[in-house]
Amino acid sequence: MDGQLAIILLTLLAGATIPLGGLLASFESIQPRWMKDELRHFIIAFGGGALLAAVALVLVPEGIKAVPVWQVALWMVTGSLAFMGLDLRLAKNGSPAAQLTAMLADFVPEALALGAAAAGGGSAGLVLALLIALQNLPEGFNSFREVRHAGNSTRHVLLIFCMLTLLGPICGLTGYHLLAGHDALIGAIMLFASGGILYLVFQDIAPQAKLARHWTPPLGAVAGFLLGLIGELLLNPG
C-alpha cells in the first residue's frame, strides 16, 4: 500500500473514535440514576488515565530523545502556561472545553509522530493507530458531554467531532512530508503538548472524576493508564 494512503487510513481509524465516543455519550437514559452518575465519572477518570498514559509512556519518552534537558523544561513549562492561558480564556467566556482541548493536545502530536515514523520506515503504525483510537473513545465521550452541556445541540457537536476526525490525516501527512527527520521539532511539539495535558488533567479533568460517597470512579484512571501501558508494551516488547 502507498505510504500516504496508509497514513490517511490509519489516522482516520485513530480519529474515528472521537465521534463514536460522542455518539455513545449522546445516549443519556441509563437507569438507575446512581449507575448513570458512577459510569459518567468512571469514564471521565478513564479518559484522564489514558491522557496520563499518553504523556508518561509516549509523548515524554519520545520527546526527550531529541532535545537537551533545558529544552525539555522549556517546552513543558511553555505548554503548561499556554494551556493555562487558554483555560482562563475559555472560563472567562463561559465555554469550558478542557476535555476537548486535552484530547486534541494528545491526538495532534501523536498523529504527527505517526506520519513521521511512517516516512522513516516505522512498522508499528497499525498498533499505534489502534492505541490512539482507544484513547480517543473515552476522551470523545467526555468531550461530547462537556461541549453539549455548554448549550450546543447534539447534532452540532457530533458534526464538529466528525470534522475533527480529519485532523488525523492532515497531521499524519504533515508529519510524513515535513517532519520526518526533524526529531527535535517533533520532540518539542510532544513536550509542549505534555505540559498542557498535565495542566488540564489536574486542573479540570481529575476534579470532575470525583463523586461523593463513591469509590469506583478512580479505578477508571487506573484502567485508562493500564490501557496505555499495555499498548506501550505491545509497541516495544523488548
Image (spheres, rainbow, N blue to C red):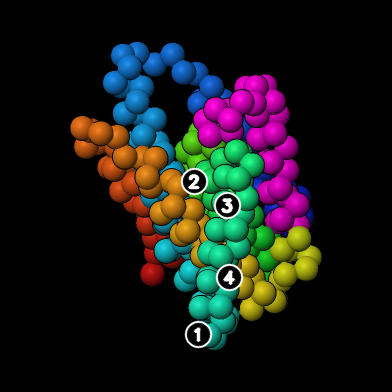
Judge whether 156 appears above or below 14 on screen.
Answer: above
Q: Residues within 10 Å of mark 3 (few under 14, many from 20)?
A: some
Majority secondary structure in the magenta region = helix
Residue 121 visible, this orientation? no
Give the quadrant of residue 29: top left
Residue receiving disc 4: 78
Q: What's under tag 1, amino acid-wise? A: Val
Residue in front for this viewpoint, 143 or 9: 143
Q: Which residue is mark 3?
A: 88
Q: Nearer the viewer, mark 1 or mark 3?
A: 3
Tell me the amino acid under the disc marked 2.
Gln
Q: Which residue is mark 2?
A: 135
Q: Which residue is mark 1?
A: 69
Q: Which residues are magenta?
A: 145-173
- Mark 1–mark 4 Cα distance, whole angstroms, equals 14 Å
Numbered badge on residue 165: none
Contact, mark 1 vs mark 3 (Cβ under 8 Å)? no
Rate crowding at label 2 as few (under 14), some (14 to 19) or many (20 or more) other CA atoms within 10 Å: many
2 or 4: tag closer to the N-terminus: 4
Tell us which disc is closer to us: 4 or 3: 3
Q: Earlier in the sequence, mark 1 or mark 4?
A: 1
**Which of the two discs, 1 and 3, labels the residue nearer the N terminus?**
1
**Dot 1 or dot 2, earlier in sequence:** 1
The kind of secondary structure element at disc 2 is helix
Q: Can see residue 26?
A: yes
Query: Which label's residue is closer to the chain start, 3 or 2?
Result: 3
